[in-house]
Image: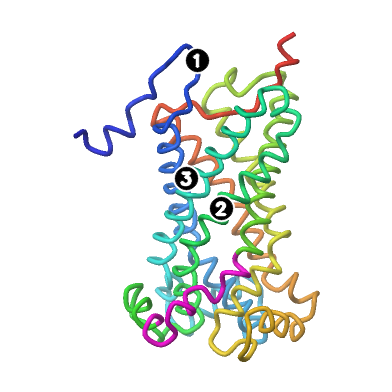
Amino acid sequence: MAPTGQVLLAPSPAQGGKVYDFMYYLKGAAAGGICCSITHGALTPVDVVKTRVQLDPVKYNRGLMGGFRQVIAEEGAMALTTGLGATVIGYFIQGWFKFGGVEFFKINAAQYLGAQKAWENKTTIYIGAAAGAEFIADLFLCPLEAVRIRAVSDPTWANGLADGFVKMATTEGIGGFYAGLVPILFKQVPYTCAKFVVQGSVADSIYASMGKTPLEVGNSTAISISLLSGVIAGVASAIISHPADTLLSKVNKKGAGGDGPMMARLMKIAGEMGIWKLCTTGLSARCVMIGTLTAGQFGIFDTVMNALGAEKFHFHNPAADH
C-alpha cells in the first residue's frame, strides 16, 4: 500500500477531461483541513482577546490592542496561546469536512443540473453546499470548541486539551460538549454560506473585469484574487455571524443564562446584553480576525490544491463560449 503522502500527491487520472473523483475530494478535504488549522491556529491570540471581550466587556473595554496588553500584563504572554491545541485539532477536522464537503456537494449539484443551469443557480448551489458541509463539520467541531472556550474563559480550569476533555466529560457528560451546538450552527452556517457565496461572487467579478477565466491566469494572480476576495468575504461573513458568535462565547461560560433548555438560556443572554451589544461587542476584533483568516484560508487552500495536482472546480458559463 502506498504511503498517504504519495496517494495525495498522485494526480487524478485523466479521462478525456477534468475528473472529480474520490482522490479529488480527498485532496480537497486535506487542503481544507490544512488551511483551517493553520489560519485558526495562527490567530489564536486574537481569538483569546476577542473571547475575553465578549465574556467580560466591562473589564476588557480598551479595544483589541488594549485587550492584548491587559492579558499579557495580568497572565503573561503564554495566556494568548490558551486553547491552541483544541483550535488546531478542531479546525483541521472542521476544515476537512467543510472545504471537502463544499467541493463534493457543489460539484455533484453542478453535474446533476448541467453546466448552464449550474451557472444560473450557482449562488443557490453555494448556499446549499456550504450549509450541508458546515452542519456535518460542526458536529465534529463543537466538542473541541466547548473545551477551548471554557479554557479561555477560565485559564485555571484545565491543564491542556486532554485534561479539558476529561473534566468536561466527568462533570457535565456529553451534553457539556454540545451545549453550544445550536449557537455554533447559528454562527457557522450563515458565516460559511456568506463566505463561499461572497468569495465566489467577488472572484468571478474580478475575473470578468479582466476578461479571463481562472485557467487563463498564472498561479500568483489566481492566489492574489483568492486573497482579495477572501478578505471581502471574511468581513461580510464576520458581520453576519457575529451575534451568534457572541452567544456561543457566552453560553459556554459556566452558569451563563442560568438553568433550563438551551433556547431559554440563549434568549436570556440575548435579553441581558441587548441587540446592539450582541451585534457589536468584540466586532472590530472579529472583523480583523475573520478577514485575515478567510483570506488566508482561500489562499492556502488554492496553493495546497495546486501542490497536490488537483485542478479546482469553477462554475463555467457555457454561453460565454459562443
| Residue carrying label 2 | 293
> Residue reaching furthest front?
112
Q: Quadrant of residue 258?
A: bottom right
Q: Position of residue 23 (x, y in %)?
A: 39, 32
| Residue carrying label 3 | 32
- Inspect the image, locate mark 1, and give the three-letter code of the amino acid beneath it: Gly
- Determine the main secondary structure of the stretch shown in magenta: helix
Q: Secondary structure at mark 3?
A: helix
Colour convention: rainbow
In-image side of 131 versus 280 (left or right): left
Residue pictured at 68% horizontal, 47% vertical: 233
Q: Position of residue 89 (x, y in %)?
A: 39, 60
- Inspect the image, locate mark 3, and give the three-letter code of the amino acid beneath it: Gly
In-image side of 253 versus 159 (left or right): right
Q: CA distance from mark 1 to mark 3?
A: 24 Å
Residue 195 magenta = no
Residue 170 magenta = yes
132 in relation to 47, above or below: above
Quadrant, the N terminus? top left
Crowdedness of circle 1 by 10 Å Cα count: few (<14), some, many (20+)?
A: few
In-image side of 48 versus 156 (left or right): right
Q: CA distance from mark 2 to mark 1?
A: 33 Å
Residue range in magenta is 168-184
Q: Secondary structure at mark 2?
A: helix
Residue pictured at 41% horizontal, 66% vertical: 86
| Residue carrying label 1 | 17
Q: Nearer the viewer, mark 2 or mark 3?
A: 3
Q: Position of residue 304 (x, y in %)?
A: 43, 36
- Inspect the image, locate mark 2, and give the three-letter code of the amino acid beneath it: Leu
